[in-house]
Image (cartoon, grey):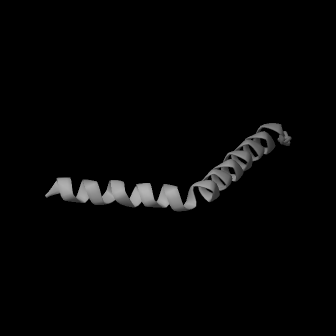
Amino acid sequence: MSVIYESIGRLVVFVVRKRFGRQLQVAAGFAVAAGVIGAYLLASRDVEEG
């Protein structure tokens, strides 16, 4: 029975990648850029002492 569910899942992933591949790449690029900017802002903030 799990073979059926696995093949359905693989088919869904294939269709989604085929249909929305470019949009997924753009969204992933924005997510990586946002993560890098967020990490930079966290690393470069000044911490008040005392």
- For image coordinates 56% across by 60% down, the residue present is 20
- For image coordinates 33% across by 58% down, the residue present is 9
- For image coordinates 77% across by 45% down, the residue present is 37
Residue 44: x percent and y percent?
Answer: 83, 38
Give the quadrant of the N terminus.
bottom left
Is 13 placed above or below 48 here? below
Give the quadrant of the C terminus.
top right
Along the line of sight, the residue nearer the viewer: 45 or 18: 18
Along the line of sight, the residue nearer the viewer: 20 or 43: 20
Q: Is residue 50 visible?
A: no
What number of labels is visible?
Answer: 0
Query: Along the horizontal axis of the image, is 43 left or right of 20?
Result: right
Residue 17: x percent and y percent?
Answer: 50, 55
Residue 10: x percent and y percent?
Answer: 34, 53
Is 27 placed above or below 35 here? below
- For image coordinates 27% across by 55% down, the residue present is 7
Is 32 placed above or below 14 here? above
Residue 32: x percent and y percent?
Answer: 68, 45
- The quarter of the picture where residue 43 lies is top right
